[in-house]
Image: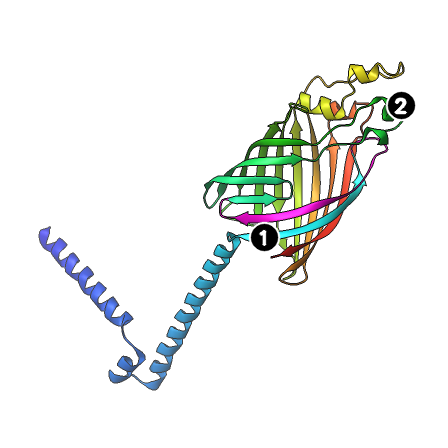
Amino acid sequence: MKKILLIFSAIMLYSNLAFSAVENLSTGDVYLFGESNNNNLTVQDNQETLALDEFDIQNNTQSSATATTDRFQIGIALTTGKREYKEMAKFEFMPLFDIKYKQFYLDKTVAGIYIIQNEEIKVSLVGEYNMASYDASKLPSPYNIIMNNRDNEIHGGFGITFTPITDNNIEFNLRLTRDFVGKSNGFKTYIEAIRTIPYTQSIILKPKVLYTFMNRDYINYYYGVTSSEAAKDTDVTAYSAQTSGYKFGFGFDLDYQISRTFTIKSFNKIEWHSNEITESPITEDLSIEIGGGFVLSL
């Protein structure tokens, strides 16, 4: 048995030495050993192939590194459409931010700091400027007189991003936040599934599936009618949801890169609302958003 092991070890050692010697051979060495010019060309071709393979590996590594490098994009967009409130159209300007610096990121109205990062999962602490306010004077009568305005909120919580190794063009986002300024004292859970489709070198398509869960406090603040508001008109009945509710819908974004520094963006979505929202006298069954703008890459 010992002899067999010694023989096997000797064979492996010899093979390694031979392989190392072959690796270190140059085209000149092959020519000196009496090989033909055709063989010399074959070796050169092999070396060129190896060089191309190394180039591809470097490119892949560079592309992967570029995907995680710092970036700074700012812009502005105009959004219009149909809000979740009756007779209330949406027409507003909003800033567009896509900034990443080391562990910090800012995406539109959501800022975060990554606390866990690996190839598939990222976990971050997040803060969100929740743009859900409305001007009550734009509601239908008599609610435009008796209702109070609802304000934007500052939310805090954490987010999780999952990108499968098998397909990095798919991304799942989960964000759990709650009100920290005492407006609604509510919380919401936002879930998003995005598919990135490189249509051409300059056009990227992003279909989405969207789901937002909201607890009762959140719904009652933004979609409810308080008893004090209803008391101002005898024909109005107060409304408050008894359970949590949700929105569910689809989105479609498009990025058109004009140059390295200038990109045009389009984003659209439609969402349906659960009964806890639609049973309010001031809300609609669905909401639609259509928007467009541009960003500058600095």
Question: Residue 148: horizontal and vertical position, in percent?
Answer: 79, 24
Q: Amino acid at mark 1?
A: Phe
Q: Residue at x 64, y 51 (%)?
A: 74
> Where 84 sits versus 208, above or below?
above
Secondary structure, magenta segment, majority class: strand
Q: Quadrant of the C terminus?
A: bottom right
Residue 84 location (% of width, % of height): 78, 32
Residue at image position (57%, 46%) is 170
Nearer to me, 280 or 14: 280
Q: Which residue position is annotated with label 2? A: 142
Residue located 28% across and 84% down the image: 31
Disc 2 crowd rating (10 Å Cα; few below 14, some 14-19, many 20+) is some
Residue 244, can we see it?
Answer: no
| Residue on which the image places disc 1 | 72
Vertical placement of residue 1 versus 235, above or below: below
Disc 2 vs disc 1: Cβ atoms closer than 8 Å? no
Q: Is residue 92 magenta?
A: yes
Give the camera-side residue of 38 and 275.
275
The residue depicted at 64 percent of the width and 40 percent of the height is 109
Q: Which residues are magenta?
A: 84-103
> What amino acid does circle 2 point to?
Pro
Residue 215 is inside the magenta segment: no
